[in-house]
Image (spheres, rainbow, N blue to C red):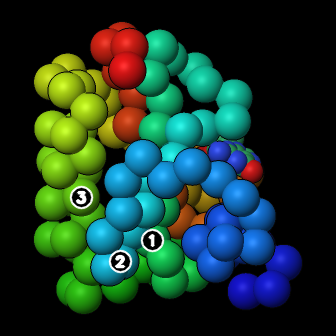
């Protein structure tokens, strides 16, 4: 998607520090953190929201990515959030998973 901010970050067209990366996902800090640590787990492939995400193909990898990045950063206690749809507060229409934790990294 040409006009999508997270696609641009995925392609390196907009610079952002990747805290973690694998073949299918990357993890960055949220621009406007709502917790001590606020990360975004973002698939490299565009899908507008969880409704269109290919869970068959990427579901297990998404969970593994969350486990790996939190382990790598020493985050043992956290919550995850996926805003799906405008009425639920989704602002960026490229699927992303929020990781929110009181643990400072
Ligand atoms: P949503 O409400 O769509 O679930 O969350 C979008 C999140 O993306 C917001 O928490 C917002 O702060 C974050 N965000 C929007 N643009 C950027 C950006 O360019 N870089 C980063 N790191 N985060 C962004
Ligand atoms: Zn995108």
Ligand 1 within 8 Å, label 3 CB: no
Label 2 crowding class (10 Å Cα cut-off): few <14, some 14-19, many 20+? few
User: In the rendered image of this protein, does residue 105 appear above or below residue 66?
Assistant: above
Q: Is residue 24 visible?
A: yes
- Counting the numbered discs, the total is 3
Q: Which residue is mark 3?
A: 65
96 displayed left or right of 73: right
- Report the residue at 54% width, 38% height from top: 29
Q: Quadrant of the C terminus?
A: top left
Q: CA distance from mark 2 to mark 3?
A: 9 Å
Q: Is residue 87 visible?
A: no
Q: Which mark is residue 24?
A: 2
89 displayed left or right of 70: right
Closer to the chain start, of discs 2 and 1, is 2
Q: Which residue is mark 1?
A: 43
Q: CA distance from mark 2 to mark 1?
A: 6 Å
- Report the residue at 84% width, 78% height from top: 3
13 displayed left or right of 25: right
Q: Confirm or deny contact between disc 2 and disc 1 (CB under 8 A).
A: yes
Q: Confirm or deny contact between disc 2 and disc 3 (CB under 8 A).
A: yes
């Amino acid at each position: 998607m040409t006009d999508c901010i997270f696609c641009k970050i995925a392609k390196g067209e907009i610079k952002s520090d990747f805290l973690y990366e694998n073949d299918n996902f990357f993890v960055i800090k949220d621009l406007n953190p709502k917790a001590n640590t606020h990360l975004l787990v973002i698939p490299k492939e565009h899908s507008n929201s969880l409704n269109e995400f290919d869970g068959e193909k990427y579901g297990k990898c998404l969970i593994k990515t969350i486990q790996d990045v939190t382990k790598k950063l020493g985050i043992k206690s956290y919550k995850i959030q996926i805003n799906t749809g405008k009425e639920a507060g989704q602002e960026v229409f490229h699927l992303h998973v929020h990781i929110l934790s009181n643990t400072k990294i």
